[in-house]
Amino acid sequence: VASDSRYAIGPRVLWLAGRRLQQIELRAAGRPHLVELARRTGETAHLAVLEQGQVVYIDKVESGGPLRMASTVGAIMPAHCTALGKAMLAFLPPTQLQEILRTHGLPRRTANTITDPAHLMAELAAVRARGYAIDNVENEEGIRCVGAPIVDHRGQVAGAISVSGSVATITLERARRELSSRVREAAQQISRALGWTQPSTHPKGGEA
């Protein structure tokens, strides 16, 4: 513990300070790619991290269209029903994933929310295989999202990036055929900016 005659800095404070610096670095690295992703897709782009098992938005670029997303920077969302969250959960060590599920459960947000643990495990396995996640109207009515994980220089999950829009503009076909590749490309570019140099498309992670 660092200290002087009056104050002591505990490990928790140092950890929080380190996390904050990582988020600042991630936001700085991600901002230009977030702007470009929103421009190329015409949809709202989000950048987020996983904090204590939940998704925290750290940046957002609105689409040029009339739809305005309810999300705000600093807002907290469940991980199991968002594309951002599933993209990060899929690559966590199994013990960490199980602890998150024990702590937060799988509360229902819409009729499409995955609330069965076995179903979620199968979904996360699919995310690992393809490198991106889809929120198929699982968190907010009428909204579909596509997200991909961002990794740091160690190949560990540092955050995620996504595009979100109405089900009218983001159909499942468009999500899979077009948006998935654009979101993954943006995630890989941000990962490289953070020092990731591995040739593999996907980050490190354990089988859940």
Image (spheres, helix red, strand yellow):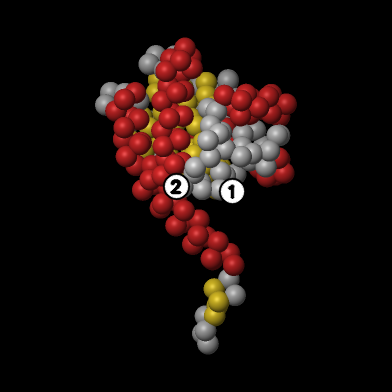
Q: Is residue 77 above or below residue 165?
A: below
Of callouts 2 and 1, the N-terminal one: 1
Q: Residues within 10 Å of mark 2 (few under 14, many from 20)?
A: many
Taking the spot 55% from the left edge, 28% from the top edge, the residue there is 131
Quarter of the image with the C terminus in it: top right
Q: Which mark is residue 100?
A: none
Taking the spot 55% from the left edge, 76% from the top edge, the residue there is 2
Taking the spot 31% from the left edge, 32% from the top edge, the residue there is 36
Look at discs 2 and 1 and give the one toward the viewer: 2
Q: Residues within 10 Å of mark 1 (few under 14, many from 20)?
A: few
- Residues 19 and 116: in front is 19
Q: Secondary structure at mark 2?
A: loop
Q: Is residue 193 left or right of residue 2?
A: left
Could you tell me if residue 60 is visible in this image? Answer: yes
User: Circle 2 sits on which residue?
Assistant: 194
Q: Secondary structure at mark 1?
A: loop
Q: CA distance from mark 2 to mark 1?
A: 22 Å
Could you tell me if residue 142 is visible in this image? Answer: no
Residue 64 x, y percent position in the rendering: 26, 26
Quarter of the image with the N terminus in it: bottom right
Taking the spot 44% from the left edge, 42% from the top edge, the residue there is 192
Q: Is residue 110 left or right of residue 105?
A: left
The amino acid sitting under disc 1 is Gln
Instruction: State the count of labels.
Output: 2
Residue 182 x, y percent position in the rendering: 41, 25
User: Circle 1 sits on which residue?
Assistant: 52
Residue 190 x, y percent position in the rendering: 42, 40
Which residue is most to the top?
173
Residue 191 x, y percent position in the rendering: 46, 41
